[in-house]
Amino acid sequence: MNFEEFEELKTHFSGEAADLIPVLQKIQGAQGYLSPESIRRVSRWLRISENEIYGVATFFAQFRFQKPGRHVIKVCLGTACHVRGGEQILDVLKRRLNIEPGAVTADGLYQLERVACLGCCALAPVVSIDGKIYGQTSVLKIQELLDGGLHHDQP
Amino acid sequence: MSSQTQPPIEKKTIRLEINHRAVTCPEGATILRAAELNGIYIPSLCSHKDLSPFGGCRLCMVEVEGMRGYPLACSTPAAEGQKVLTETAALRDMRREIMELILSEHPSSCLLCSEKEECSGVLQTIRKSGVTTGCRYCPNDGQCELQALVEKLGITDIHYPIYYRGYEAEHDDPFFDRDYNICILCGRCVRMCQEVRGTAVLAFTSRGPKTQIGPAFGRSHIEAGCEFCGACLDVCPTGALADKTSKWDGPPDGSAVSTCPFCALGCQVELFHKDGRLSKARAHLDPEINDGQLCVRGRFCMPETTHHHQRARKPMIKHGAYFREVSWPEALDAVAARLKNVRPGEFLMAVSPDLTNEGLYAARKFVTESLGSPGLDSTARWALPGGADVWSRLLSLPISIKGLASAEAVLAVGLDSRFSFSVAGVEIRRALKEGAKLVTIDSRESNLARYTDHWLRPRPGGEGETLLALAEKMAGAPPESKGTREESASGLTTRDLDEAARVLGSGKSLAVLVGPAVFGRDKGGAAARALLMLAGRENTIFLPLYQGANTRGALELGILDQSAGGMRLEDVLEGRAKPKVIYLVGETPFLERPDCDYLIAQDIYLPPFEVDAFLPAASFAEAGGTLTNVEGRVQEIVQIECLPDGAIAGFVRPDWFIFSQLSSRVSQRGFVYESWRDVLRDISGHVQGFPAVPDRRPRRMTWKTDFRDVKASPESASGGDLVLLLEPGGFRHRGIDLSFVVEGLTELKLEEGFRLHPSDLAALGLEPGETLTLSWNGTEASAPVRADADLPPGAAAAWRPSAYGGLLHRRSLLPLFRQPDDVLSVRVASRKGKKSRKT
Ligand code: SF4
Ligand code: SF4
Ligand code: SF4
Ligand code: FES
Ligand code: FES
């Protein structure tokens, strides 16, 4: 979010401390995450310390502090998927990408998430990659996907 | 705000019943407070009397008739006719349960170990590491609120699975360690840092079992803006936060309330001692000045300052090529013999503005009466530009530290309160919390910038002029100079100033603070004139902040007048005068030995150059005395260490004692004092308005001379590549800079080289750490560079120490310190970077 965009955003609020959460939501909506830079700007504007803002923001699961990865992999661990091996899939992905759920790989390519239920339990275990649902997956299938499919659509 | 101006409303008394006992408490108290006031104990952990209720630990549950469930005593107000029970069987069970849950996440061998009783016998060992010798892993052992509570609740066993968080202890920041494995998440530190300090470095992050305490993005405390005030340590009920230097000292033997010897605010501290030595300092809850708050110096720097291994503790005399330790009589005889032969006009003594009133007075008496010499000077004169004329006027204004908190508007000029005068910063933020408005005038982005309502950012060094322009505006006076002063001198527009004046408002009570850098740069006296102009405004208080702990004492005791007749330090520095004998008392305004035949130093550390005689002075911990703070309070420094002469204490003596010993050796007109109290009595007999015993009432100075207006300012610096600001700074105490002896201050890395705005660094093609050479008037100085985003672009800053003890690494900047100006226009002479720049 650049200077102009931020100034524009300011005009929608009164600049009270109570605006904090909606402001953070707007910023996250615009740039996908809360960067240290944007938190600093909000801090100066609303006169709340960066540390307090960070404290408040980390309380809510919705806020992210890292630039989102180019590919978002969501592994379902809802009841059905859990029973059918979702945990193992997540485990393999964690090891392969070398990150914990919620984080992004160092090259910025992959972001790993765990979700509760994607609403298609019949297809369990389910993984969604960039919004596309992959049903009845297995540890093997996911590995193949990563080996092959995902890299091809790189710019 | 109105509560401050109206007379306090009589608080109603409430009657209630606790444990079937009729008790009373003031209206507005919580049940916990009501119980406390009546000597009834309710277990509590997260509540603290200085902090807002939090309701986190739930230990303080009570039963109240007519209320459902178990209300929390710490956050439920006491009400008329309430019937409270604090010790029912149900409550006891629940409390034990809660405590066990807390302990299931807290290493608890110090609490529950079955060997606890036998343990003390095996604690001691002479081995250095690698063996378990009793569990002394928690620095809080023996002085822990949690321990006390566990004992009170009689818990001997935990029925829940033990969970160890496995966090790495945080040792990287200076001054205190943090081990969040021991933390019970009571939130006291967070509330202290947010509510009371207003710094808000600490916050709860994440939630649930991952909840942790710390700054944003896992930053270090240095990066997050921590002031290292230690307030969080003082409220932590566990050993999670611990002072690096004293953490393993164990429970102290005793304590005494004393005065911080490091700056003119004169905060009250509680000094703890262990085995006869100072162990640590904590803020004293003194309602008149600091109210439980301190800055990094007062909180953390005292023990190291007096105990550092390089502390010089024995008299030494140069004999031919040898510099050797001698006895006191021998040293005094040698020094006296030399002083007896010096002609009054060839002698110069420099006394530090950090000396006690007693030390300063005895020094003056010694020089003027025993030696009959006019040669007495002090860097106090540098700290108070304009001299006694101006400053006896300024110090006759209504000055108040505590008054800041109740001001409706605050004007802070050139003040960064992160590491210096932090207590004033806390008071400002208290006022802001009550709705006050803040205007800052600063070319740097100070730590107050985050809170300000209107920031006037003049050109570097233009703070004084801007203040004057604003004062003229507020007083409705016609501008002194033709044309608009503000635009010519400060680079600000009239609109900026109008806006600032509007924010400050006309009818509101106002507090005006001016930092030491402003006075230092203000050769034209604009700041002083502005303050005097604002003095006409109703409801206005002032806080002019200068360097030196007892600079005001030096002024009142006539040290500044004295320098009019004799030689001055500048004359010696610039080679215009060559005294035969120089006697430095806690002063090291030189980095190299000044030109003279015989050099005497009397201090707590050796100066960084050769001397002919060294007399070891007692430090603030080893000698009693008084200091005069900025408000004129004459406050006692308590002698906390009274060890006999010997290997540990050395052979140090108070300054006044050394002078009295010397006086009888050099002349018939010797003076004898038995204790510092004698000296103080003597002072009050000779100096008008000075008390005969320590007296904490503020005094306004009376001024004797007519105020001679200081000459208008010389041409402002311009025309070079950069404006170089020399900031008065560092952490001077007597002849040394504290960063020389206090490791933590060195880690703050405040002192290194030239600081430049990142964009200027980039334009010069320099990386931090590379060397820059600046030139002006045919002289040059070089030093490594560092980025400092708080500076305005186009400015460079270096810090000009007022004491050089221990600052040998700053030799490369020596040419800068030899010249008198604090704002210089400089050219870039050379740089060791990659790209080159055309100019
Ligand atoms: S030392 Fe002071 S500023 Fe730093 S975290 Fe603790 S309370 Fe906050
Ligand atoms: S560090 Fe201390 S004060 Fe802070 S939450 Fe933990 S136990 Fe409480
Ligand atoms: S503000 Fe001054 S008096 Fe107070 S603790 Fe710091 S150095 Fe000492
Ligand atoms: S549990 Fe995985 S999709 Fe419902
Ligand atoms: S003291 Fe009341 S909840 Fe902790």
Image (tube, rainbow, N blue to C red):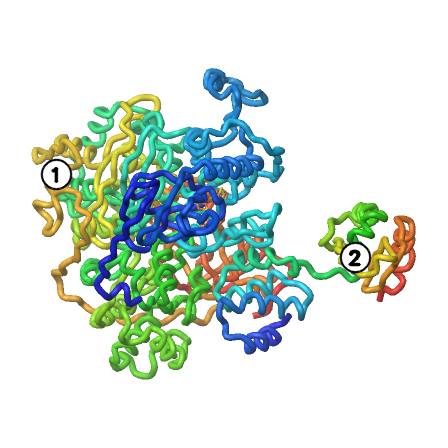
Residue drawn at (50%, 72%), measured in percent from left and top? Answer: A15
Residue drawn at (19%, 53%), measured in percent from left and top? Answer: B698
Residue drawn at (92%, 57%), measured in percent from left and top? Answer: A148
Which residue is identified by label 2?
Answer: A74
Which residue is identified by label 1?
Answer: B370
Marks 1 and 2 sit apart, C-alpha to C-alpha, by 87 Å
Q: Residues within 10 Å of mark 2 (few under 14, many from 20)?
A: many
Q: Quadrant of the C terminus of chain B?
A: bottom right
Q: Judge left or right: residue B253 versus residue A23.
A: left
Q: Position of residue B627 (x, y in %)?
A: 23, 45
Does residue B800 appear in the picture of this structure? no
As shown in the figure, which amino acid type bears the numbered disc 2?
Lys
Q: Nearer the viewer, residue B105 or B744?
A: B105
Q: Judge left or right: residue B8 versus residue A16.
A: left
Q: Position of residue A10 (x, y in %)?
A: 55, 75
Q: Which of the 4 quarters of the picture holds residue B307? A: top left
As shown in the figure, which amino acid type bears the numbered disc 1?
Ser
Q: Which of the 4 quarters of the picture holds residue B685? A: top left
Q: Residues within 10 Å of mark 1 (few under 14, many from 20)?
A: many
Instruction: Report the mark closest to the observer, 1 or 2.
Output: 2
Q: Nearer the viewer, residue B107 or B40?
A: B40
Q: Nearer the viewer, residue B647 or B396?
A: B396
Residue drawn at (32%, 55%), measured in percent from left and top? Answer: B28
Q: Secondary structure at mark 1?
A: helix
Q: Which of the 4 quarters of the picture holds residue B506? A: bottom left
Parent chain of label 2: A
Q: Position of residue B538 (x, y in %)?
A: 21, 71
Q: What is the number of the mark on residue B336?
A: none
Tell me how many marks there are.
Answer: 2
